[in-house]
Amino acid sequence: MTTDRLFDEDVDVTEAVIRVLEGAGIDMVFGIPGGYTVKLFDALYDHTSSVRTVLVREESLAGVMAEVYGRLTGKPAVVMGQGAFLLSNALLGTIEGHLASTPMLLLTDFTDGAPYSHHGPYQTGTGEWGAFDARRSFAGVTKETMVASDPAQAVQVTQLAVKHALTGEPGPVAVIYHGNALNGAVGPKTRPALYPSAPYLPVVVGPAPEAAVEAAAQTMLVAERPVIVAGNGVRMSQAYGELEQLAVQLGAPVATTATGKGVMRETHGLALGVIGNFGLPIANAVVGQADVVIAVGTKLGATDTANEHPALLDPRRQSFVQIDIEPRNASWTFPVDHALIGDAGPVLTQLSEALAAAGGVSQSAHAERQALLNEARLEHVGFDGPEAESDAAPLLPQRIIKDIHNAIDDDAIITCDAGENRIFMTHFFQTKGSGTFIQPAAIGGMGYAIPGALAAKLVFPDRQAVAVCGDGGFAMGFNGLMSAVENDLPITVVVFNNDALGWVINSQGDRPFASEFERFDHAEIARAMRCDGVRVDEPNELRTALSEAVESGRPTVVDVYTSRETTYREVTSPLAATAEYAEIAE
């Protein structure tokens, strides 16, 4: 079979790199021109109809926007800029993507100042004496880091970077270009020879072995209390429908990890909410009582398992079925009885088909499982408590969260920040649509919510995008409001304003230190940035403010004076307490 060459005439290498991105279906670039990447930005000038370039005011926004874009779409976006400043500023989203398995591309440079790179010129990152080592630094926080030294490598390495970002368990891949790599032309006589990008893209992951699927299905059929624990892998696979289908077919309740929150809409009758350290009591209770646990697209990390508390998950009394695209994740935390290696969506479909072929779950078994779930709902706390209707001022987090829930559309995208406010959202907020909740639960960095909402609005321009953050996170990310104005991205930002780093101050006891802020009016800051801004001090003001904000078609900040009365301790599961774990373990 003959494969055509990538080019039938010589083209500038930077033009060639951008054509590679186009050929791979990449349509979004975030960043700031700098160093040798200015040449790549110049090439983008001629591709605005196919690749949208979003200028940000600081590289950390670019990293988060690319990470959220990848998490929502399953395909990589590009973070682009000068090496020293992607490394120093863009790693919030990069590390989140590395730990959350999000496809991303970081295209950057050595700023090597050739031919003087061995004499340590200004800003160079080649790793020689007098320079910092960009390759080693990026390698520690990416799935793969690749270097291009000449024009042919610049093209091929970019193609391979797309492949590696998407193959198997996805992740961020960095490409560092030497200055010489972005000078000159490539064409039909270039060596190594250059070919179209399509063959470099990853092939579709094959199905799990049929015998393994059938054995897992039999275990699920005979279970008395099966439960599904779904993680971020469901989101990366876009397997929302397949997950819900299996749950309904099996009559199994669905809990999620924190990174998987919302992969099944939490208003569904089988949805339990999040498990683990900050999980809902009903979710932890039902999972803890299960005899068969189907773990889908989750590594079952320590915060998901309440530090591997045996009252929650225990292979000595529970059978495990684990679905994961990365073989190393199977039986990583716990030994599993049935490891099904493959993409979550296709494997869930395989299980559904195997269950149907085996006759399915009997009506009596369905009824028994539903009765057990109904009993658990009566016994254990779910999403809503009396605090959600409280008229206390300053406003309780529970009241703010309930009003957000009521104000937004079912398909609105919620992006969260880090800190106590995120824990409250993880615990109390009930998602109304599948795949609508994004949070930095892999690394947990502040300054994530606002750029995350900007990316969500770019992916889904016709859906509401709401960023929820604390006043600390707002201070780190509010320059994203400038990008919202400049790119006509009408996001809503809700600020839990309690004049403090909530998690920090509530862990310091009677010795608060370096954790309190002066009072700032974030709504006024927003108005100064040509956005709308509303200050809410009383509970009766909030619902109107939120409803008007999400419907306004304008970037809007709703700054809510928030009580410190509720703390992270009140939403921390007793299972996460070391003393209780030790007592049970004994």
Image (spheres, rainbow, N blue to C red):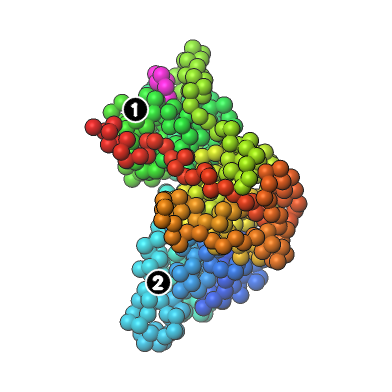
Q: Residue at x 36, y 87 (%)?
A: 119
Does residue 153 show up? no
Q: Residues within 10 Å of mark 2 (few under 14, many from 20)?
A: many
- What kind of element bears circle 1? strand
Residues rendered magenta in the picture: 220-226
User: Is the residue 388 above or below the residue 363 in the image?
Assistant: below
Q: Residue at x 66, y 64 (%)?
A: 525
Q: Where is residue 580 in the image (x, y as percent from the top left)?
A: 32, 35
Q: Which mark is residue 134?
A: 2
Residue 486: image tag: none
Looking at the image, residue 233 sits to the left or right of residue 535; the answer is: left
What residue is rendered at 38% in x and 76% in y? 132
| Residue 79 shown left or right of residue 512 in the figure | right
Tell me residue 514's x, y (percent). 45, 62
Mark with earlier residue (2, 1): 2
Answer with the quarter of the image where residue 486 lies: bottom right
Is residue 112 visible in this depiction of the protein?
A: yes
- Per the rendering, the mark at residue 319 is 1
